[in-house]
Structure formats: C-alpha cells, structure tokens
Image (cartoon, grey):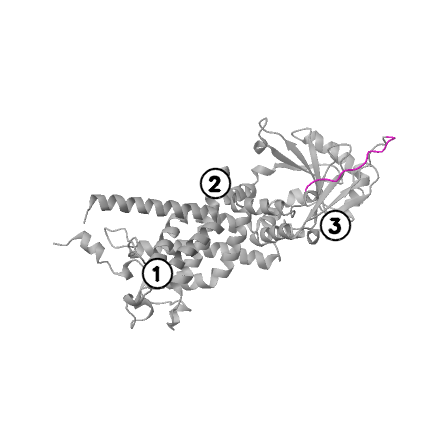
C-alpha cells in the first residue's frame, strides 16, 4: 500500500522546481544544485502565488492607463475640437457662461491651448463632505470659444481613466490599497531577482537558456517561454516597477520626506507667488488681458495651459504647462493680476536634484518621457509581467501532482548562507513593506515548525 507521507517526502525536485536537471543538462544531477537553489525557488514560488491577484489588477490597469491621453482624445473629440472662426468671445464672458453651468460657485481654473481649433475648459471645485477633502470633486465645463455654446461637462473623478488610475494605485481601497500595491511592487522586484537566479546558466550552454522551444511537452514549452522571455524582460520590467515605488505609501512618502529634509522640495513649484496689492487699489486685469500673457509661453498646440485663478488679492495667477501629462516637461509661471508682469518661470531643469529624480521616475513609469516609443515599452512591461505571472501559476497547476499541493518542500537547515541573510536584510531595509512581510512569514514559518515538532516529537 502506498504511503502519501513517504511519497511527499521522496518527491523529486523536478516535480515542483521550474528547472530540473533533465530540463537543462541531462548529464547534471539535481544533487549538484547549490543548496541555496531550493530556498530561492521556494520564495519565488510563494511570492508569485500570493501576489498574483493584485499583480494582475496592477498590470492590466497600468497597460490601459499608458494610452489614456490618446484614448481620451479619441473618445472626447466633441468636447475638445471646434471649428475655428475669426471672432472669439472674451475669456471673461466665457467664465460667466461657465459659472451659469457650474455645479458650484468656485471656478478655480481655466485650461486653454494655443490652438484655434480647441475648446476652452473651466474647472469648478465642488466640495464634498465637510472636513473631508477626499470627497471633493472637480467639474470640467467645456465651451466653444466662438459662440459660447456648452459642449459638455464631466466630473474628473468619475472619468473612466481616473477610476483606472485609482485601481492601479490603491485598488480603490485608500491607504490600505496603496500599501498592498506597494507590497506587490516590492515583491515583484524580488520575483525578478530570484527568477534571474533560478534561470542562471551556471556553466551550462543549452540553447533553451536563450531561446524557448516551440515543440515538445506542453509544460516544457510553457516553462521555456516563462523563463526565457522573463530574462529578456527583466531590465524593462525592473525599471517600470522600481519607478512605481515613487507613488507608494511608505517608500514614496519616505523619498518625499528625504527630499524635503534635504531642501530639495520646491514650494514655489506648487504655490502661486505673492504680489503687492497697489495702494490705490486699482481693478485687477481682465482674463482677456491675462490669458494671452500665459499663452505667449506655450511651446506647442499640444501644450495644455492650466491657469489657476488668483484666490486672494495678494496672490498671483499661476499657470501649469504640460504636454501629454509628462511631468518631466511640466513648467510653471505666475502673472501679477494687477500689472500683468510675468515672474517665477520655473522649468524642470531649474528644480533641485531629488525632486528632478522624482519627475523623471513618474514620467518613466507612465511611459511619457520619450513619447510613443516609451509608451510601447511600458505596455510591453505591463503585459510581460502579467504574462509571467499567468504562466508561472499555469506551470504550477500543470505540474502539480494529483492529490497534492505541489508546493516546494521546506529546505534543509543551513541551506541559506550568511550572505543570503544579509541580502534579505538589505531587501527588507530598501523595501520596508516587503521587509515587514518577510519578517511576518519567517515568524509564521517558525511558529508552524514549532507546533509541528511539538505534535511530532522525534
């Protein structure tokens, strides 16, 4: 009669490991594998299994959001495009029309382009629950600048791509979701590193290390595509995943705090400049006088000029210039509402180094930094990581022995050398959320082992 416990104990390495000796070199036995191999494989397996649901959500939404600008422009042509004419209404008159169609009395901004065929958009700030700014909304009001007709309105927070972005960043779960996505992002980088270790040739020259087979047993073909495509995608996925940490709750906030402590966080980048209110209290300039001063600094017809109106008598109007949401191209300028004088013109190159790094990271992560080529690369990274996760789970399910979990065996004591523990400690420090999870897993593993030894004394 067969003994299930004995079968589990004598289960061969090739039953659960992604690369058995017969897969790579028939002349090499599994006993020649480094003792560290089962440890790395076990962590790689469990990390891939436990992070997969959130990882799929993050990669799918990331792939969608990469092309949000192009897809939104195609979807909203009726809101953005108008027929250019010779006579335009004044911006002051357009503001009056926008106010009549706004959901609140707080018109806080105007978005214009140096393109006669583009509409004009006003932004109304709609307050939510008292003392809870998270519930605030922003209503966009699109007008034809030639006849003042209302082209449509939209709540920015309800837009499809706004929802996609929330799912990508925090799973619509607020701070808890941000921590979970940071956990998955950190473990994604660890998965890449452990995957490289598992693939590493170690002197072997088999072509399947570099080119996936197209024929053979389904599992072997699946494993080749998982491993070989993964090794080629590691640099790309690693860059996209690492730059994603700048958005996270713990790591991202820690970087921001460091930048602030070092004086690399420019408040003038966000805040409108102060101005002196004339003693004789003249009337502020009209929008029709102010807006052309901002448009004079526009770099192209695609440059969205978002003008935030002066909130107080001693505060300037401030404009943000952005092309395709590329933060690396974002610049700002303030205009004195009484004299029309332009000042505080800030380009990204003028910013402190650490904040500049943050802008680079954000643009790289979103695939914006070099236009369409990097968008395509970001798409490949997102879909590639999704494919690696799916094929990894598929491999486990396909290889799993009937009636057993197919989970990796517990490595022998002493399998992890001292330098391995040092690497784990460094990873825990560099990625704090992952470090806490590693400590939790090790503690749980120790408790389970202690309980097992008490129930099964030698």
Residue 350 in the image: state x and y as whole percent. 71, 52
The residue furthest front is: 418
In front: label 3 or label 1: 1
Disc 1, SS: helix
- Which numbered tag is attached to residue 298? 3
- Disc 1: which residue: 36
Foreground of the two, 31 or 101: 31
Residue 274 in magenta?
yes
The Cα–Cα distance between marks 2 and 3, rounded to whole angstroms, is 38 Å
Instruction: Tell me the element at label 2.
Output: helix
Q: Is residue 309 visible?
A: yes
Query: Relative to residue 56, is residue 316 depicted above or below?
Result: above
- Dot 3 and dot 1 residues touching (CB under 8 Å): no
Query: Magenta residues?
Result: 270-280
Query: Which quadrant would the N terminus be assigned to in this image?
Result: bottom left
Q: Position of residue 324 (x, y in %)?
A: 64, 50
The earlier-in-sequence mark between 2 and 1 is: 1
Residue at which label 2 appears: 177
Q: Is residue 129 left or right of residue 185?
A: right
Residue 84, given in percent of the width and then of the height, sits at: 75, 46
């Amino acid at each position: 009669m067969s003994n299930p416990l004995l079968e589990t104990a004598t289960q061969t390495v090739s039953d659960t490991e992604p690369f058995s000796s017969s897969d790579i070199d028939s002349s090499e036995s599994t006993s020649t594998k480094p003792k560290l191999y089962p440890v790395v494989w076990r962590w790689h397996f469990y990390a891939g299994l436990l992070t997969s649901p959130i990882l799929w959500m993050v990669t799918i939404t990331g792939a969608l959001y990469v092309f949000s600008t192009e897809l939104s422009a195609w979807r909203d042509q009726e809101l953005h495009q108008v027929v250019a004419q010779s006579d335009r209404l004044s911006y002051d008159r357009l503001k009056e029309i926008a106010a009549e169609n706004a959901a609140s009395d707080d018109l806080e901004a105007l978005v214009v382009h140096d393109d006669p065929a583009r509409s004009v958009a006003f932004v109304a700030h709609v307050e939510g629950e008292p003392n809870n700014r998270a519930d605030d909304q922003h209503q966009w009001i699109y007008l034809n600048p030639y006849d003042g007709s209302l082209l449509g309105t939209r709540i920015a927070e309800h837009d499809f791509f706004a929802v996609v972005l929330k799912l990508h960043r925090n799973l619509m779960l607020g701070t808890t979701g941000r921590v979970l996505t940071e956990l998955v992002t950190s473990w994604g980088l660890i998965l890449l590193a452990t995957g490289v270790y598992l693939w590493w040739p170690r002197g072997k020259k088999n072509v399947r290390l570099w080119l996936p087979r197209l024929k053979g047993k389904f599992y072997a073909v699946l494993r080749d595509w998982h491993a070989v495509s993964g090794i080629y995608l590691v640099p790309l996925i690693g860059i996209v995943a690492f730059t994603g940490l700048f958005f996270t709750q713990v790591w991202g906030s820690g970087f921001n705090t460091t930048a602030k402590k070092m004086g690399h966080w420019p408040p003038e980048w966000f805040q409108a400049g102060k101005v002196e209110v004339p003693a004789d209290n003249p009337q502020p300039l009209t929008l029709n006088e102010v807006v052309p001063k901002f448009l004079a600094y526009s770099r192209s017809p695609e440059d969205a000029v978002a003008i935030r109106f002066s909130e107080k008598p001693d505060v300037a109007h401030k404009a943000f210039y952005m092309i395709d949401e590329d933060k690396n191209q974002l610049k700002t300028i303030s205009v004195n509402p009484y004299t029309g004088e332009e000042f505080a013109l800030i380009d990204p190159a003028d910013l402190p180094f650490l904040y500049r790094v943050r802008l680079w990271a954000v643009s790289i992560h979103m695939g914006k930094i070099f236009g369409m080529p990097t968008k395509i690369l970001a798409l490949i990274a997102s879909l590639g990581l999704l494919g690696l996760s799916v094929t990894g789970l598929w491999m486990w399910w396909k290889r799993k022995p009937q009636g057993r979990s197919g989970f990796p065996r517990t490595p022998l004591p002493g399998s992890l050398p001292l330098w391995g523990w040092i690497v784990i400690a460094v990873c825990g420090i560099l990625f704090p959320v992952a470090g806490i999870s590693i400590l939790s897993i090790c503690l749980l593993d120790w408790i389970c082992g202690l309980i097992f030894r008490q129930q099964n004394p030698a």
